[in-house]
Image (spheres, coloured by chain):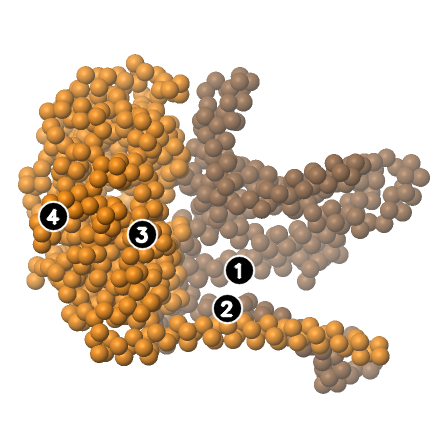
Chain colours: A brown, B orange
């Protein structure tokens, strides 16, 4: 960039006018959908009433944030959100890598492709249906209980959906079933990009399968792994609420309610749009901080980063 | 050459982008005036010249907060007839999932359809100024509306400060109650098997369930289920917590109990009597008579269970299990259908299902301020309130769904059979689709020819009973289910209407407290019912303490004020 012959901006603009023109729509899109809405953050400092002009709104300073941090329930839902998303990160991240590694070792092409297709298909199934399947399977007369009973592991049916502390596990497991295949696609793609000569050389040197996996495949996809990890850390607080909402019930609610649901119940549903916005801001700030910190750590330790 | 070729590609892409953008812009631009014209020019001038029967085709958009499973896109015979008479085609959009969220979002966006049915969330829209005041429109274009509501028209006014009419109340006006709405249900097979035992108190109810379940541990090869409850989302209020009020003598005021003397409202759980009811549920669970999946199952699972015929007892509102019961009827399992009994905690308590609330216009269909043609909209609603429309909507089309014999409307037996046993009847014919939530004549109200507007008549209800039902009733020495209940005349009319129709204003402390209390109830009630009996009292105390801490009394005070306002407004 900073070479001796620094051309004036205008000249660059004219010379690369088509490139600039081509990128313009995307910049405009980004601006309209990602930057303009930040204006809505002003709502968090008002007591917003719908249907009134901006000038007529009452300004309340940090009241909404104070109310938020004073609410016990907020900490409960924050715990659930972080708990479930960390579990999702742990499982939904390591399992696809392992799966991709193993699948890559399969020699039979047809078998490999069928497995890959079968495992990513659940990704396209709606959570409504997955939740229905899971709760039917885990009900008293469900298949899981029937298997457990016939194997004499338990004497009477287990009420899976009534165990508060199992809820995170159930959500994570169903998430794993749904997303493992899909998430492994990117790793499989990265593995294919590794130069086969490396493998050949290693084989000549007498390296076995696991050695090659460890010394060639894994280091080969390390950049992908790192970038994916940093990005998922940025998403930690925004895990959505579909699965928790659909799988939850009143008994496990203390472990099922997540931030997004809290925003709906205590923000939008009771007409406190400002309060909901305050939570949104908090959410975004936490995400940015997590992203920046993890990025810095990875930059320092592994020289890989996204920013 | 090469350079030119290279340029051509980005240019082509750029041109494509511009075309696409232009296309999307022009599309929305051309749509808007299309939407706008009917309001501005043709009908605007026509309505000014007061042409009462403007039948030019018009599409009115409508939002329905409460999805109508029978909605038929106005393609049914009745729906087509309505379009033919009025020229109006309704384009419905229903809320999926939480209604309140959808309506809140609508209010936040400020974009409304022509007609809005907010199903109890009117306050959000009134706050946002979404409704048109209908007072003048009714005065000018609403003769049928005025006739249908009569003196109750003043009850449609919003509140003491704002006396506008924002919507036309749902539910039959001057309804006579002929069928119990709530109660404790037992399969006919159970009472028959036990020789028609006395069914007055919870103890009697429990004994019946227990004896039958012990005697018949399986039904059709599957384990018998005693009492099944449903706690799916908001439905916990219907089968889990409402019966606590009913069995202790309270009328249906939703989450409230109103002192008949002082008119002070109480969050109903705080009444000491109700502890007894929940304790009984706890006991039912401990002895294995409560369905273990009561708090986990979803509505479809609940319906499927009932339809299988192995749930012997319910504590539900009729409308919630009626579809499942219809499936039983279709399958010919008449014995597995349910009788409704006014069970109470003690024998001296009167089950108040039949207490009259007068007419309370809790919710209904309103016209939005952005409606493209408010005059056509109000005329459409007025037509729906007319005798012609009421008869069409309740009875169907003459010669097809009913016929006239000796000047009386009669439904032929084969049509009647379809009506009662075909769950899709409403969808196929359109009958009943345009009644609720639109203006409705009440059950038992007579038209100018002296016949009821509704198809319900005491005889018709009786004629609908199955043989098993008639048999059970005769053994209890009555003709109808309502005869088992304390009659309407034995209660005073509630001067506040139905308290569940009063909304706490949005964005207030009371609204937040209400949400908190709801969360506490949702958590603590299942917990106390599923707890070991020894722990019940401790959890109940925690429950009360939690409610206290959340500010339940402050909310009660606020609500009592709203109630007082309403009583004052109605009695002006």
N-term-proximal mark, 3 vs 4:
3
Q: Residue furthest top?
A: B215
Which residue lies under the disc numbered 1? A284
* Residue B538 seen: no
Which residue lies under the disc numbered 4? B407
**Tag 1 and tag 3 share a subunit:** no
Q: Secondary structure at mark 3?
A: helix
Q: Check the residue under mark 2 and report the chain it is in.
A: A
* Residue sitting at x 16%, y 26%: B473
Which residue lies under the disc numbered 2? A38
Q: Secondary structure at mark 1?
A: helix
Q: Is residue B201 above or below residue B405?
A: above
In the depicted view, which residue is nearer to us: B425 or A176? Answer: B425
Q: CA distance from mark 3 to mark 4?
A: 23 Å
Q: Secondary structure at mark 4?
A: loop
Q: Nearer the viewer, mark 3 or mark 2?
A: 3
Question: Looking at the figure, which quarter contains the C terminus of chain A?
Answer: bottom right
Q: CA distance from mark 1 to mark 3?
A: 53 Å
């Amino acid at each position: 960039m900073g070479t001796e012959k620094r051309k004036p901006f205008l000249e660059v603009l004219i010379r690369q006018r088509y490139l600039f023109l081509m990128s313009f729509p995307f910049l405009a899109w980004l601006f309209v959908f990602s930057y303009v809405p930040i204006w809505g953050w002003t709502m968090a400092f008002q007591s917003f009433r719908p249907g009134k002009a901006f000038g007529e709104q009452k300004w309340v300073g940090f009241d909404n944030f104070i109310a938020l941090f004073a609410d016990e329930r907020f900490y409960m839902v924050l715990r659930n959100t972080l708990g479930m998303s960390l579990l999702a990160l742990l499982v939904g991240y390591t399992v696809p890598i392992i799966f991709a590694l193993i699948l890559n070792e399969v020699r039979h092409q047809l078998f490999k492709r069928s497995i890959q297709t079968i495992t990513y298909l659940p990704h396209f199934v709606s959570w409504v249906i997955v939740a229905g399947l899971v709760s039917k399977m885990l009900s008293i007369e469900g298949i899981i209980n029937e298997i457990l009973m016939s194997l004499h592991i338990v004497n009477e049916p287990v009420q899976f959906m009534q165990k508060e502390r199992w809820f995170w596990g159930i959500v994570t497991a169903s998430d794993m079933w749904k997303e493992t295949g899909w998430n492994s696609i990117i790793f499989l793609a990265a593995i294919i990009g590794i130069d086969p000569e490396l493998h050949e050389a290693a084989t000549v040197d007498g390296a076995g399968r696991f050695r090659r996996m460890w010394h060639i495949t894994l280091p080969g996809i390390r950049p992908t792994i790192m970038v994916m990890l940093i990005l998922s850390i940025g998403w930690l607080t925004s895990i959505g609420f579909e699965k928790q909402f659909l799988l939850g019930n009143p008994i496990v609610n203390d472990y099922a309610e997540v931030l997004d649901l809290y925003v709906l119940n205590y923000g939008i549903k009771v007409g406190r749009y400002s309060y909901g916005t305050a939570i949104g801001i908090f959410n975004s700030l936490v995400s940015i901080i997590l992203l920046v910190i993890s990025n810095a750590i990875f930059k320092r330790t592994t020289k890989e980063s996204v920013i | 050459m090469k350079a030119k070729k290279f340029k051509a590609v980005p240019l082509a892409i750029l041109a494509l982008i511009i075309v696409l953008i232009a296309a999307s812009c022009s599309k929305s631009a051309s749509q808007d005036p299309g939407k706008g014209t009917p309001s501005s020019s043709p009908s605007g001038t026509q309505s000014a010249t007061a042409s009462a029967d403007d039948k030019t085709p018009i599409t009115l958009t409508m939002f329905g907060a409460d999805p109508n499973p029978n909605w038929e896109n106005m393609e049914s015979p009745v729906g087509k007839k309505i379009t033919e008479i009025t020229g109006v085609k309704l384009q419905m959009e229903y809320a999926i999932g939480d209604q309140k969220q959808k309506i809140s979002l609508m209010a936040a966006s400020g974009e409304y359809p022509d007609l809005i049915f907010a199903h109890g969330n009117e306050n959000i829209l009134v706050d946002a100024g979404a409704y048109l005041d209908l007072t003048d429109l009714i005065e000018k274009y609403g003769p049928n509306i005025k006739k249908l509501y009569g003196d109750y028209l003043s009850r449609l006014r919003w509140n003491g400060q704002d006396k506008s009419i924002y919507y036309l109340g749902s539910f039959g006006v001057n309804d006579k109650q002929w069928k119990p709405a709530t109660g404790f249900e037992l399969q006919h097979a159970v009472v028959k098997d036990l020789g028609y035992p006395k069914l007055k108190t919870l103890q009697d109810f429990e004994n019946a369930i227990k004896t039958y379940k012990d005697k018949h541990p399986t039904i059709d090869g599957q384990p018998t289920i005693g009492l099944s409850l449903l706690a799916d989302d908001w439905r916990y209020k219907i089968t889990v917590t409402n019966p606590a009020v009913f069995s202790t003598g309270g009328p249906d005021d939703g989450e409230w109990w109103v002192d008949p003397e002082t008119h002070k409202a109480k969050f109903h759980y705080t009444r000491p009597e109700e502890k007894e009811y929940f304790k009984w549920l706890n006991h039912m669970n401990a002895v294995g008579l409560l369905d273990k999946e009561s708090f986990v199952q979803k509505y479809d699972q609940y319906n499927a269970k009932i339809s299988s015929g192995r749930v012997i007892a319910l504590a539900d509102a009729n409308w919630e299990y009626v579809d499942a019961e219809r499936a039983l009827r279709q399958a010919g399992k008449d014995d597995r259908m349910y009788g409704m009994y006014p069970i109470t905690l003690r024998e001296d308590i009167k089950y108040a299902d039949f207490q009259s609330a007068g007419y309370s216009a809790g919710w209904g269909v309103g016209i939005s301020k952005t409606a493209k043609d408010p005059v056509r909209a109000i005329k459409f609603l007025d037509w729906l309130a007319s005798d012609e429309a009421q008869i069409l909507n309740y009875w169907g089309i003459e010669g097809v769904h009913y016929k006239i014999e000796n000047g009386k409307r009669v439904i032929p037996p084969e049509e009647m059979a379809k009506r009662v046993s075909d769950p899709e009847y409403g969808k196929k014919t359109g009958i009943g689709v345009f009644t609720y939530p639109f203006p409705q004549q009440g059950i038992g109200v007579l038209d100018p020819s002296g016949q009821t507007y509704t198809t319900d008549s005491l005889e018709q209800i009786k004629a609908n009973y199955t043989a098993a039902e008639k048999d059970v009733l005769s053994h209890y020495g009555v003709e109808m289910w309502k005869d088992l209940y304390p009659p309407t005349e034995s209660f005073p009319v509630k001067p506040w209407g139905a308290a569940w129709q009063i909304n706490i204003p949005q964005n207030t402390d009371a609204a937040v407290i209400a949400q908190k209390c709801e969360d506490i109830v949702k958590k603590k009630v299942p917990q106390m019912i599923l707890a070991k009996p020894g722990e019940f009292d401790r959890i109940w105390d925690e429950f009360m303490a939690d409610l206290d801490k959340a500010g339940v009394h402050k909310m009660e005070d606020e609500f009592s004020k709203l109630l007082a306002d309403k009583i004052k407004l109605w009695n002006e």
